[in-house]
Image: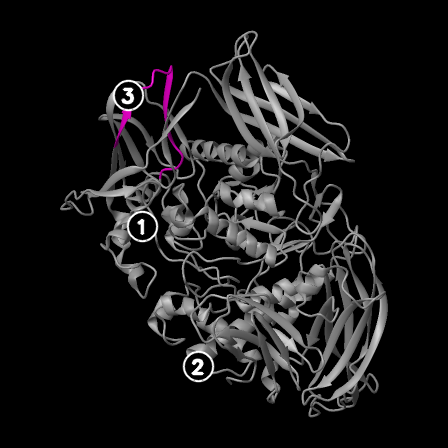
Amino acid sequence: MLTTKTLMQWEFTQLANSTDDQAKEDWAACNVPTSVHVQLRRLGRIPDPFAGLNEWDVQWIQEADWGFRTTFEHTASAVNADLVFEGLDTYCDVYLNGKLLMSADNMFVTHRVDARPALRKGTNELYLHFKAPWLAAKQEEAANGGKRVLWNGDSCRLYSRKAQYGWGWDWGPVMMTVGPWKPIRLETYDHRIEDVAVIADYVDGLGTLKGTAALAPETEEGWTIVATLRRHRDVVAQASGTTSFEFTLAKGSVEAWWPLGYGAQPMYDLDVAWLDAHGHELATHHQRVAFRHFELVQAPLDGQPGTSFVFEINGVRVFCAGANWIPADSFLTEVTRERYRRWVGLMVKANMCMLRVWGGGVYEDEALYDACDEHGILVWQDFMFGCGMYPSYPKFNESVKLEATQAVTRLRKHPSVVVFAGNNEDYQVAESLNLNTSDDKQFPARYIYEELLPAVVKPSGIAYHRGSPYGGKSSSDPTVGDIHQWNVWHGTQELWSAWPRLAGRFVSEFGMQGFPDRRTLAVTGARHPQDRAMANHNKAAGYERRIELYLVENFRYGFELGQYAYATQVMQAECLAAAYRAWRREWKGRGMEYVAGALVWQLNDCWPCVSWSIVDYYLRPKPAFYAIARELRRYTVGVSRKLVREPRDETTAAYFTETEQVEVWACNSTLQSMDVRVFISAFHLDGRLLDRRYVDATLAPNASTEVGGGEVPGQIKRTSESHVLLPIIVHAQLYARDSHAPATAADKRANGSGSGVLARFSSWPEPYKYLDLPDPGLAVDVDGERVRLACTKPAKAVVLDSDGDEDIDWSDQAIDLVPGDEQVVVARGLKGRVVLKYLGIDA
């Protein structure tokens, strides 16, 4: 049987090298997994790299060599003894009792090394010599073609199979980690099950499962493997074979796995035992499995050009609303299993069902994928290539193939993982240089993305996409594949009202920056929007111009840090909610999935900073998080407004009549139609109710439905550009028609009201800077952890806080209020007094 000894107690020290030949060894105790930065911070030898300008005082670490050593006892008499290094970051020579066992140069690869040639009974010393990653990557670059074009970081990163974000990104610091970042263990055994490759499917209520075991050493005559499938410890089925097995499962004996919002996520235990001819157990293996059928549908559409890009699970097409994931810390060993689960829990709270693991980070910890399996979060997994013209040469490609093979082998068992993508924006970089991406000389990594990686992925049954974005005539073709829509913020810097025409078949990136929570800002050391600490904690090039552009176009705002932060938070919330609202409207039913998904950039941060994240480093959601969550509920209602001008005749520009009109629609992500009543109210900004009416409609299942429209009630008709439209808020409320009550208690809780409202939305005149906002007469009633909000005049973007420093779990934020439609916010952990901000109070 397999015996495992995990080696956790180590020592580490800096070693002399060409950069610092005077470095003296100074061994200090540490635990593994770890990184040098983490240990030096723990020992007080470096300042907190995240505070102030300290990032720049720790850059020497990446140019130094480092040693790690440990001792262990060995007494086992097993035939085999392997040292297993799950992850070495990155350039490392491994010595056992003074003998070189191996050299590593790929952070993403697990190494299993036969230790027997150097292993001895009794005490053994294991020594790791980590070479300076900056210097090693520079040497690789010089030896294999020199500098190459990229976005973010130094071009030497393109030659290094190390997490690319460590070279610095437009949201993260330059923090190149060093050390054994995953567990190290000694395994002794006579026989071992190396892997069990499982293909599970679910069609028409029937689950199937096939498995193949990789055994070490090879099996002998009469030996068998026995596979047992269990649910809650109850045996569902058993099967056996020499190296493979297959379950024939009766219809209904297993349940399907579904994405969040579409059904449950039942997970099954699969135990595989390897038996000799006498039935004695030689080795065992355990993993979890689930049953689901998946297709990535790329088919012609009704009424629009191009093809769909739809994720279909168990025959149901899913609008994939979600987020992009970057590493949750600059120091990966600091991210606990519980922290991963909290991140996925926030996705559930935001009603998201897809997470894209971005290609400049790492193939993530099992804890993340386990949590996605359990909560129904589909995973789009990039391979680790990002924003660059990567090389392609034999040594590099061999390392990439091993890396990709291990990643696919590890992740294929997760039902949440539905697609691998070859890279992040590498085709885009090539296109920006006007290169031919079909020419290996101009675009060397074409071989990796179009031949090597798809061949590795194919046996897994998981979909493969050449890159993100990719499709059509170019990577920006909105009619085929996926796009990264950065013409809001980057690019042409469009108004966010342009989101409807900036749509694509699948929008896998889009975003807007917003400041983090005040408690997080305090950690950065920033005291003013324009101080040095602030500048160091926003890595986006030209961020000042872009933030100011979108603020000045839309808001009146102040420059005190709290006022400025709030204005950016409302800006981000309004912008991102508008995108989801517009694109979900384009999910119009089978064959009309004009937009099949939208993944916001980005869910999280790797350090306390200002970025595009909707939740900051400390897992504190920004107001945008809540605005998005409202747009992704099972039922939503939307209102758009536009000016319609009719000239007196075709000869004149001076004589016209212009009316303001609205369109109203609703979305239903359930698989049943829904009879609804939509109340549409018009309020003057001074609080007067100008009109209230309702429309009855039947919402189609799993689609958006147009409800109605017409002129804004009470609005003037313009006949001159000098005529100013009245400040009228159009407020829509969605009810179930049979009882004016939500379909479930969950809907009632989600909408923060006992009034039976399924969904609500307020359309305000934009830009907001033209509005003279009155005191809305807010009434706040706090009853324990329940905060009831009401107003006498419409209030925009109400954000709640407490006067203390405790973290509070708010059920909603950035709330629009109108008279007569009070809302209730649950504030778990509230201890202090509630403090409010709303648009106009600070400006």
**Mark toward the start of the polypeptide (2 vs 3):** 3
Mark 3 is surrounded, within 10 Å at the Cα level, by few (under 14), some (14 to 19) or many (20 or more) other residues, namely: some
Amino acid tagged 1:
Val
139, above or below 712, in the image: above
> Which image quarter is the N terminus in?
top left
Q: Position of residue 828 (x, y in %)?
A: 54, 65
Q: Is residue 92 magenta?
A: no
Between tags 1 and 2, which lies in front? 1
Q: Which mark is residue 254?
A: none
In the picture, the disc for residue 559 is 2
**Front residue of this view, candidates 476 and 112:** 112
Residue that carries the numbered disc 1 in the rendered image: 38
- The picture places residue 830, in percent across and down from the top left corner, at 51, 69
Q: Residues within 10 Å of mark 2 (few under 14, many from 20)?
A: some
* Residue type (three-letter) at the residue carrying disc 3: Leu
Q: Is residue 260 visible?
A: yes
The magenta region covers: 71-88
Disc 1: CA contacts within 10 A as few (<14), some (14-19) or many (>=20): many
Give residue 110's quadrant in the image. top left
